[in-house]
Image (spheres, rainbow, N blue to C red):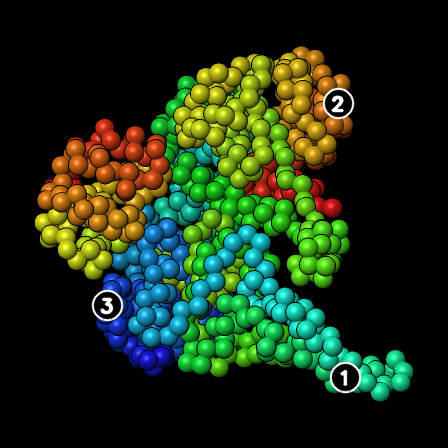
Amino acid sequence: MGFDRLTSIEAITAGLDTVGYISTPDISTAVFLAQHLRKPILIEGPAGVGKTDLAKSTAAFLELPLVRLQCYEGLDEGKALYEWKYGKQLLYTQVLKEKLHHILDGAESLAASFEKLHGFDDLFFSEAFLEPRPLLQALRQEHGAVLLIDEVDKADEEFEAFLLEVLSDYQVTVPELGTVSALVPPLVMLTSNNTREIGDALKRRCLHLHIGFPEAGREARIVRARVPDISEALLKRLVAFVQTLRAEDIRKLPSIAETVDWARTLLILHAESLDADLVRRTLNVLLKFENDIRLVEPKLEKILRKAAEG
Amino acid sequence: MERPLNNFIRALRAAEIPVSTGEAMDAFRTAALLGYDDRSALKRGLAATMAKTLEEAETFDRIFDLYFRRGSPPASASPESAGAGGEAGPAPRDLAELARQGDATELSLAFEAAAEEVGVQRIQFSTQVGYFARRMLDVMGLQALEGRLIDRLRTGGAEAEAEAEELMAIRARLTGEARRIVEREFETFGQSATEAFRADVLRRRSLGELDRRDMERMKVLIQKMARRLAAKYSRRRRKRKTGQLDLRRTMRANAGVDGVPFTVHWRAKRRDRAKVVAICDTSQSVARSVRFLLLFLYSLTEVIPDIRSFAFSSRLKEVSGDFEDLDFETAMEKVLKEVGYGATNYGQALSDFVTDHPKAVDRRTTVIILGDGRSNYANPRLDLFKDIAAQAKAVIWLTPEGPSLWGTGDSEIQRYRAHCSALAHCTNAADLERAIDDVLASYQG
């Protein structure tokens, strides 16, 4: 287990295959370089093409823990790095109130009491009261970890700047405890749906990986891996249909996640082949916008025919 | 093998991929890890380290293929395989040679011919300047020059280095010149907005007749800008004043536990949401840029949640609903059908605005006006404008006309200007972006 499994690009492709992730040379190369150059990977691409899944699968393949940090607007250091367990600290002070009398026993003046207390002050800001959040957790994994920073484009710009600091040295400073360096630097993957432009500084410090919609062969392999019960004939037709559909001018193109869902749907419906009526009834699995569905419905026959030819 | 990679990076930089020093170091380590034997693996690895956007990846592919061709670099002469653009035109002469000789007349003739061939006159938006300039240079044989440049970098050695340096300089100079020509063409069209030309634009109602690719480029640009705005915007709204205890809320929350502060509440400073009213002129006088203005308005609607948009020629109409529900093409057609291409009357529009939407503007609102301020000599109703400006937080006027035209003919813009917080001439996305940044900045504080 661990990072030593990332010996070559081929080993990565094969390894990801064993955990059900169908890789491409681009993806494997990026993972390989990420480990050997100690660089985070910034993964971009449309929703549902397996960005998050890559991190999960890599962690599964390496048998390392996956530490996930989901970004959102307003995410701050406290939520990402560490917090003090305030409630526990308070509880302890309340419980230990009595003990204070013992400790302070015999202290004549305020200065003397202060002196006596001084030896204990760090108690409440020690490991026992530290609540590690994802970034700190990832640094403290004994054998390393896969750190997934999901949807980094949703976080604020300040947070990006903060990430730069953490990701360049793989260490953070907790003022009360000192600097925590990674035992083993984690493999970091950042994903972005490109709802906003990621800062240039962050982009330039990461390896860049763009995962687009898969070509037919790879899509078929992915669906087969996820929905093993599907018949070959149906699989072929279904993938051809989705591939053709992607050429249409619609707002949200169906991605792999939708294809897999659709395959499952068809399986539940015991469908043996694709006909216009069946597709029409299940179209809402593939297309997520009312407008898109309305746009595609009249053209269904044509798309099906085109898919059958191509 | 250090030198080839070094020169490859220089070729990338010459093609405007901003490879940083850190990335260059990564590239060297990548090459050491992957080796030079498997070209496709090397290509993928180097792309991951140096090409950080899709556009950069495209350029990277092209240059990599040129640079790492198998076999030794050809001795001299421009590589034929580089295949310059321009299918029909005469075979492009050696561009570098032409530039080197420094024959100004011949060079400018070549530029003119290229401008003719790619149809620079069709330019509609100043955002297309880069695109047309590039097409012109392609026609003139820039790819051959680039091929030669990459070749020289591959070869290495003092002599080749010197030539590469020179070629880079020539490339930069030609690019500058081409941009200047296209910009001038754009200006000319701006200033000779004759009736005939207007009528021509009028006829072209549907977007389908516009060069679709150009429109796509434009959209991408604005969406990119909108994304950047979204980043700035959400950040400012979310600004919190942390670290200060909200005593009142804390005490109330902990009354049940004897006042021992188990749950604490911090004071948060709420920012105003940007509230924007945008009013867009869609009359004849701005026919040339109306698509641009509306596209911008449409993008704004997507970015800012609290926005009301209006359009007018003489009568004013709220278009927020159309923009939210319909896709851009349909919405634009609808808006132009209802209020488009009439004779402008700013006074009438302002009075409609005040009468029909008396509550649209309050002290938190920023009013954005898109238009040229040409009011066909009708009463500009400065009094109403002044009232609106006094109520609003800020009034920002964006005009497609250049400053030299302000106040000429029926332009009232100089008189409106007195009541605007900002007046900006904007013909390209960069101008727009700056102006909108100002809007968002005015909410700080």
- Amino acid type of the residue tagged 1 in the rendering: His
- Amino acid type of the residue tagged 2 in the rendering: Asp
* Circle 1 residue: A102
Q: CA distance from mark 3 to mark 2?
A: 68 Å
Closer mark to the observer between disc 3 and disc 2 = 3
Question: What is the quadrant of residue B99 in the picture?
Answer: bottom left
Residue at far right of view: A109
Give the camera-side residue of A142 and B228.
A142
* Circle 2 residue: B387
Would residue B73 be visible to someone looking at this image? no
Q: CA distance from mark 2 to mark 1?
A: 73 Å
Element type at mark 1: helix
| Same subunit, tags 3 and 2 | no
Q: Mark 1 belongs to which subunit?
A: A
* Circle 3 residue: A17
Decide if residue A208 is on the left or right side of residue A100: left
10 Å neighbourhood of mark 3: few (<14), some, or many (≥20)?
Answer: some
- Looking at the image, residue B397 lies above or below residue A271: above
Q: Position of residue B252 (x, y in %)?
A: 72, 51
Question: Which residue is at a point 55% across and 18% down the rendered structure image?
Answer: B317
Mark closer to the chain start, 1 or 3: 3
Element type at mark 3: helix
Decide if residue B388 is on the left or right side of residue A115: left
10 Å neighbourhood of mark 2: few (<14), some, or many (≥20)?
Answer: few
| Same subunit, tags 2 and 1 | no
